[in-house]
Amino acid sequence: MGRILCVANQKGGVGKTTTAINLAAALAKAGYHTLVADFDPQCNATSGLGCRPILHHPLARGLPIHEAIVPTKVPGLELLPGTRSFRDVERLARDPELAPQIREQLRWGLAGYDFVLIDCPPSVGQLTKTALASSDEVLMPIQCEYFAMEGLAQMIEVIRQVMKSDAPKLQFAGILLTMYDHTLELTLEVEREVREFFGEIVFQTVIPRDVALAEAPSHGLPVIEYAPRSRGTRAYVELSWEVRELG
Ligand code: ATP
Ligand code: MG
């Protein structure tokens, strides 16, 4: 049985999708059978991997997920695309009664993978709760900026609730500092604050600001394929080592 990691933070634009795609690609490159599951109606993980959103989502319709899973350009990396279909998004996002069924579907469908990375939307709504409740671990990217800590308490409270009611085995994989710029005093300040407050659950690896990470999705590729020698690639490979050590 593999590990299901949920990449979540209610704050938008902190690097959730970038992390889901590039951590997954680094794991696949290391020989692990890996899946990205796109739970965000924006479908950024789907297009970032050069794939198309699906019209009908199996999770909204009680269908097996394997029929919707597609290969990507990275060997060993597959994708459960997201959907923009209003009806399916509404069902997935609004119907709490669907959650246990979705969890069951995911557990069955994901059994063959070494790693599954779920990319969440920027909210603490039902979609994120379902994703959390279906996961073994949660990975929370935090952008090294002034408002980084804001809203974090709410996110952590939601994670606690899910741990209590639906997923007693859910664990913190860790907090990841993204868009890190060591030349900025602000970055170093945020890092100090986050490490002081959260201690060991903060990953040692930090993800630098790197334009290759921003460009890669427009080519439908993870950074490891688009710019293998970039700093972004190195950072996500290092993160993949840390994540593997946790297992
Ligand atoms: P949303 O909440 O909308 O889903 P997100 O948390 O998934 O956003 P991303 O889409 O991964 O965040 O990143 C936001 C933007 O910042 C994107 O344009 C992405 O390409 C860019 N970006 C992410 N990480 C980095 C980085 N380390 N260096 C440079 N650009 C980055
Ligand atoms: Mg995203």
Image (cartoon, rainbow, N blue to C red):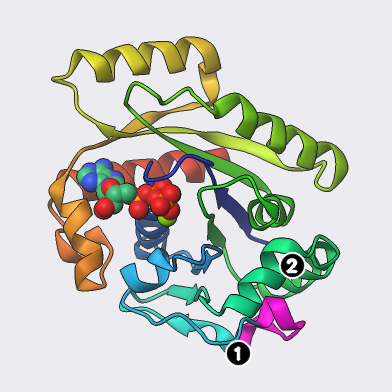
Location of the C terminus (image quadrant): top right
- Left or right of residue 243: residue 136: right
Q: In this picture, which residue range is highlighted in magenta? A: 58-67
Q: Which residue is mark 1?
A: 67
Q: Residue furthest bottom?
A: 67
Q: Nearer the viewer, residue 228 or 63?
A: 63
* Horizontal and vertical percent position of residue 81: 49, 76
Residue type pointed to by label 1: Glu
Location of the N terminus (image quadrant): bottom right
* 9 in the magenta segment: no
Question: Residue at the spot x=71%, y=72% of the render?
Answer: 91
| Magenta-drawn stretch, dominant element (helix, strand or loop) | helix
Q: Which residue is mark 2?
A: 107
Q: Is mark 2 within 8 Å of ligand 2?
A: no
Q: Earlier in the sequence, mark 2 or mark 1?
A: 1
Label 2 sits on a secondary structure element that is: helix
Question: Residue at the spot x=73%, y=83% of the render?
Answer: 61
Q: Nearer the viewer, residue 49 or 107?
A: 49
Residue type pointed to by label 2: Arg
Q: Nearer the viewer, residue 36 or 60?
A: 60
Q: CA distance from mark 2 to mark 1?
A: 15 Å
- Left or right of residue 123: residue 93: right
Q: Residues within 10 Å of mark 2 (few under 14, many from 20)?
A: some
Question: Residue at the spot x=74%, y=67% of the render?
Answer: 107
* 60 in the magenta segment: yes
Q: Residues within 10 Å of mark 1 (few under 14, many from 20)?
A: few
* Horizontal and vertical percent position of residue 212: 15, 53
